[in-house]
Image: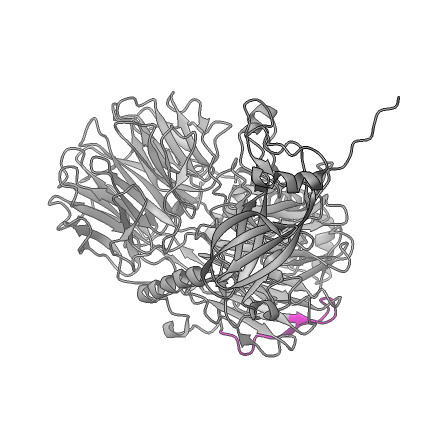
């Protein structure tokens, strides 16, 4: 994010005339916890009964860039043993100081985490689900989970409507007493937020502090020696898809001196801010001087303008300037304004004055060009991060520094809010923002300890109470360990926990996968990747980063597999030559006199399947380039509802799809619920949203490759806290729509795609997994083998390899071969038993031997795949010349089954196989006997039914002889 902080701060949002204000009951309602639990039970049933549950998926990383860490809990008796909570990637455990990790929270109703707490003496883990950072992808949780067997099993112990957990505390002397700081819903108001206390280990709860339906508790700390003294940070906020109010009068510090039974807001004259700009608060006691408390505040109040600041020509002056006054300005002053505000080089004072004289533009158009009608909110920056200190256990406060803490949390302090104090020195304090900074003088001055190998955007820090030089840090780039107070860091990123927004593939052999990640740029890597530390020795990681920032959509020109179109947030896209490294910025700009384009956080881009020189790109309008992005035409008007007042870009396009069967038949969808169709490559557009629910985010629209008039759409209510699955199909170019949500569980849908081979198959990715329909959306099956219940943001079926590639937002990329699924037509599904063809096998004299002295033995196996219409026991046999030379028992599930079969036999068939081989049949080095070259039959029996399929073991290719 280093290169785009200013962009984030000044992200352009067009504000058009206010639309009719909707009544509160006109918006999609938040989904109730009861409905979510019913949806979870439905998901479990789908997983259990699925016809495709045995189809395996493999993780292909990447790992080196990791993903967002939200909390750490370290064993005080053994700091090499600790737990790491990822925002949407589960809870992981390490017993070897971060050398390796194992996930232990993969298959609950949710995987998102806000905070964890561990009772180390009694081996009890508490997970507060629902991330507390309030970002775009801070998924809602389902209350508190408890494990007493190190994550082998979990019990939900309530608070299911709280959605996001700020902090969990355990009483140090009575572990049955637990306190929870609950933030409540992110996108809707609700009363289930505040401080909750349990005195029976979470069996029952009592809400002891409630402020308002928009104010939750984000922070809660306990006096080191007096568990009755608690301090809480309340935070009022209101997030919508178009606006985030990050502060409010409900934000305040509260104290309790009776173990959280009653609370008192600190006095108005305490010295701590209590304005409408008071935002997120982080708190920490100083362990070595327990009257000292530090607070880090996101102060959203505006900075006063400096009187002596020479700003030159200003936006305020231009807003009210007449044409004559503008024409009298010095050209150098106008050009300086253009430079300061990022105008393209083709604009200059001379030409602009000519346009003003001709009446083509007005002086105020220079302001409109750069920003929205809300620009006054951003002309003066916010105060940002401020540190306060209390020397009387939180009763009164003093700001520790005189100057602003520049470039730490910028204007988005909602994403941070953590502070920690050295266990032995009360004047050494750390706080976390974009960099992690340390103060050695009680917060008067700060020093960055964000070294070159450390990612930015920090959320968790543990300081060893016995050795304060020892730190464990968590941020958007994973886990880091320091043994010298942050002067140097060790990277501990072996888990695959990347948060992908999008996914793409090329047509190289083997093919590569591409994707854009939250705060970790855009990466490219081999589809054959398997996790290994070998790259430390070889010096090159198999994946390569194409660019930084928050990585977004990717389009690959498969004619050369080298030209890639991608970018970072809000439509900043490039054309990259991955062979030479050359990159060209391609984002179209509006012209002076027009309002700026509105770009979605994840702006859609795609190449025409009919001619990959043609690039389609979406802001709130549709842009087309016929020459690889060198020049763009803006062909449409506003294809959204027009935007809304706010500080988040809204009223933008989110998805573009061109029909594979007809050039120029294009569909687009918007974040405010509209879908449009063009039948002439974008020249004109028709709205086709009739019959669809309104105001839902269009997460995907995709044209069919099988029928010209068929098109699919998925809608998403996440930004209303509405989790209803919404998927639709149209058979008449979008003129009418039919729901195909069918038996999908209560999970927001991020993507729907059609199978390129079998027109009856569609794939759906939700916030908790991936599903497939074999009958055009009438019913769905759940994939599951090898998959955690992680959000699936994007998916694609490789057109040559028939691999289903999943881009998850929390666990990297997964790949599963769906060629067998593609064959599961109604004819096969009607059979009692069906065997799929087995690929030929090449014999090797190396079978049964080691690759090298210390290596593993080469054990030849094949996958035997079959469909059964019922559960049952049986066997798989290998038959050669009417004799069963190998047999293995099996237990079949209803649906697709894949059995690994060893290509082994025994010595009793020596004569039979020797006769075929025409040479001695001997045991391999490991003592096993293997099948020889020849034609075999594989017979599969389930119950009283059997089917057969051929197996060929062929000779290896002979090496050419040497010349004699």
Percent x, y of residue 883: 61, 50
In the rendered structure, the answer to whether residue 248 lies left or right of residue 767 reads left
Q: Residue at x 33, y 28 (%)?
A: 444
- The vertical placement of 697 against 505, above or below, is below
Quadrant of res 244: bottom left
Q: Main secondary structure of the magenta part?
A: loop
- Is 680 a magenta residue? yes
Q: Which residues are magenta?
A: 677-693
Q: Residue at x 33, y 24 (%)?
A: 440
Percent x, y of residue 797: 62, 56
- Is 23 a magenta residue? no
Q: Quadrant of the C terminus?
A: top right
Quadrant of res 221: top left
Q: Residue at x 47, y 56 (%)?
A: 647
- Camera sees residue 15: no
- The vertical placement of 159 against 152, above or below, is below
């Amino acid at each position: 994010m280093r290169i785009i902080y200013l962009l984030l701060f000044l992200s352009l949002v067009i504000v058009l005339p206010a639309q009719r204000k909707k009544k509160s009951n006109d918006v999609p309602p938040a989904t109730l916890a009861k409905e979510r639990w019913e949806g979870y039970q439905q998901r479990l049933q789908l997983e259990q009964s699925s016809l495709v549950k045995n189809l395996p998926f493999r993780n292909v990383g990447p790992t080196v860039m990791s993903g967002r860490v939200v909390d750490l809990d370290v064993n005080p008796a053994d700091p090499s043993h600790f737990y790491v909570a990822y925002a949407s990637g589960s809870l992981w455990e390490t017993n070897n100081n971060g050398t390796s990790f194992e996930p232990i929270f993969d298959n609950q109703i949710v995987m998102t985490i806000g905070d964890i707490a561990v009772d180390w003496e009694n081996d009890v883990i508490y997970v507060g689900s629902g991330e507390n950072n309030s970002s775009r992808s801070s998924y809602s949780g389902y209350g508190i989970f408890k494990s007493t067997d190190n994550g082998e099993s979990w019990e939900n112990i309530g608070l299911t409507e709280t959605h996001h957990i700020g902090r969990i505390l355990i009483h140090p002397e009575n572990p049955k007493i637990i306190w929870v700081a609950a933030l409540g819903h992110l996108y809707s108001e609700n009363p289930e937020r505040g401080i909750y206390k349990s005195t029976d280990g979470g069996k029952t709860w009592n809400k002891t502090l409630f402020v308002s339906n928009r104010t939750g508790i984000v922070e809660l700390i306990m006096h080191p020696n007096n568990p009755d003294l608690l301090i809480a940070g309340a935070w009022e906020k209101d997030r919508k898809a178009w606006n985030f109010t990050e502060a409010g009068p409900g934000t305040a510090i509260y104290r309790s001196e009776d173990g959280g039974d009653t609370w008192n807001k600190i006095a108005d004259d305490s010295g701590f801010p209590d304005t409408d700009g008071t935002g997120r608060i982080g708190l920490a006691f100083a362990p070595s001087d327990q009257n000292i408390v530090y607070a880090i505040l996101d102060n959203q109040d505006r900075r006063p303008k400096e009187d002596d600041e020479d700003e030159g020509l200003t936006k305020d002056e231009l807003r009210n300037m007449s044409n004559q006054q503008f024409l009298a300005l010095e050209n150098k002053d106008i050009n300086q304004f253009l430079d300061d505000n990022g105008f393209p080089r083709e604009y200059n004072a001379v030409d602009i004055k000519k346009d003003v004289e001709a009446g083509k533009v007005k002086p105020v158009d220079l302001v409109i060009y750069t920003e929205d009608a809300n620009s006054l909110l951003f002309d003066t920056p916010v105060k940002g991060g401020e540190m306060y200190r209390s020397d009387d256990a939180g009763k009164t406060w003093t700001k520790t520094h005189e100057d602003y803490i520049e470039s730490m949390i910028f204007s988005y302090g909602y994403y941070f809010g953590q502070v920690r104090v050295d266990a032995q020195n009360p004047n050494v304090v750390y706080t976390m923002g974009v960099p992690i900074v340390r103060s050695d003088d009680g917060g008067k001055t700060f020093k960055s300890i964000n070294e070159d190998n450390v990612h930015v955007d920090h959320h968790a820090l543990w300081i060893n109470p016995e050795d304060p030089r020892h730190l464990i840090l968590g941020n958007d780039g994973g886990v880091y360990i320091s043994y010298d107070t942050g002067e140097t860091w060790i990277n501990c990123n072996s888990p695959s926990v990347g948060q992908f927004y999008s996914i793409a593939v090329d047509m190289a052999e083997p093919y590569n996968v591409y994707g854009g990640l939250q705060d970790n740029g855009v990466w490219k890597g081999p589809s054959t990747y398997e996790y290994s530390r070998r790259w430390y020795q070889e010096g090159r990681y198999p994946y390569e980063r194409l660019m930084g920032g928050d990585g977004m959509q990717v389009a690959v020109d498969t004619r050369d597999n080298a030209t890639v179109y991608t970018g970072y947030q809000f439509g900043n896209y490039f054309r990259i030559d991955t062979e030479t490294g050359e990159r060209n910025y391609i984002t179209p700009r509006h012209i002076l006199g027009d309002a700026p384009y509105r770009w979605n956080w994840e702006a859609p881009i795609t190449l025409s399947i009919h001619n990959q020189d043609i690039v389609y790109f979406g802001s709130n309008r549709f842009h087309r380039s016929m020459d690889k992005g060198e020049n763009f035409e803006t062909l449409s008007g506003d294809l959204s509802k027009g935007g809304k007042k706010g500080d988040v870009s809204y009223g933008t396009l989110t998805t573009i799809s061109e029909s594979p069967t007809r050039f120029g038949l294009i569909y687009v969808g918007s974040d405010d619920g509209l879908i449009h169709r063009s039948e002439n490559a974008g020249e004109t557009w028709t709205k086709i949203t009739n019959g669809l629910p309104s105001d839902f985010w269009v997460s995907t629209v995709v044209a069919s490759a099988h029928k010209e008039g068929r098109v699919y759409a998925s809608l998403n209510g996440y930004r209303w806290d509405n989790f209803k699955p919404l998927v639709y199909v149209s058979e008449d170019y979008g003129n009418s729509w039919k729901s195909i949500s069918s038996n999908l569980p209560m999970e927001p849908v991020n993507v729907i795609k059609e199978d390129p081979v079998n027109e009856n198959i569609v794939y759906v990715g939700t916030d908790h997994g991936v599903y497939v329909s074999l009958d055009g959306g009438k019913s769905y099956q759940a994939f599951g083998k090898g998959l955690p219940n992680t959000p699936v943001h994007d998916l694609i079926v490789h057109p040559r390899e028939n691999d289903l590639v999943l881009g998850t937002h929390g666990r990297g990329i997964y790949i599963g071969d769906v060629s067998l699924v593609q064959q599961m037509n109604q004819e096969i599904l009607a059979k009692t038993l069906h065997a799929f063809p087995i690929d030929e096998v090449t014999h090797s004299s190396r079978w049964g031997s080691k690759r090298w002295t210390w290596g593993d033995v080469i054990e030849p196996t094949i996958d035997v795949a079959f469909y059964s219409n019922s559960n049952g026991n049986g066997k798989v046999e290998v038959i050669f010349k009417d004799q069963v030379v190998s047999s293995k028992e099996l237990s079949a599930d209803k649906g697709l089954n894949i059995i690994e079969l060893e290509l082994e036999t025994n010595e009793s068939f020596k004569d039979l196989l020797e006769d075929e081989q025409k040479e001695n049949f001997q045991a391999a080095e490991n003592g096993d006997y293997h099948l020889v070259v020849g034609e075999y039959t594989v017979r599969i029996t389930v119950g009283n039914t059997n089917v057969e399929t051929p197996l060929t073991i062929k000779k290896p290719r002979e090496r050419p002889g040497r010349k004699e």
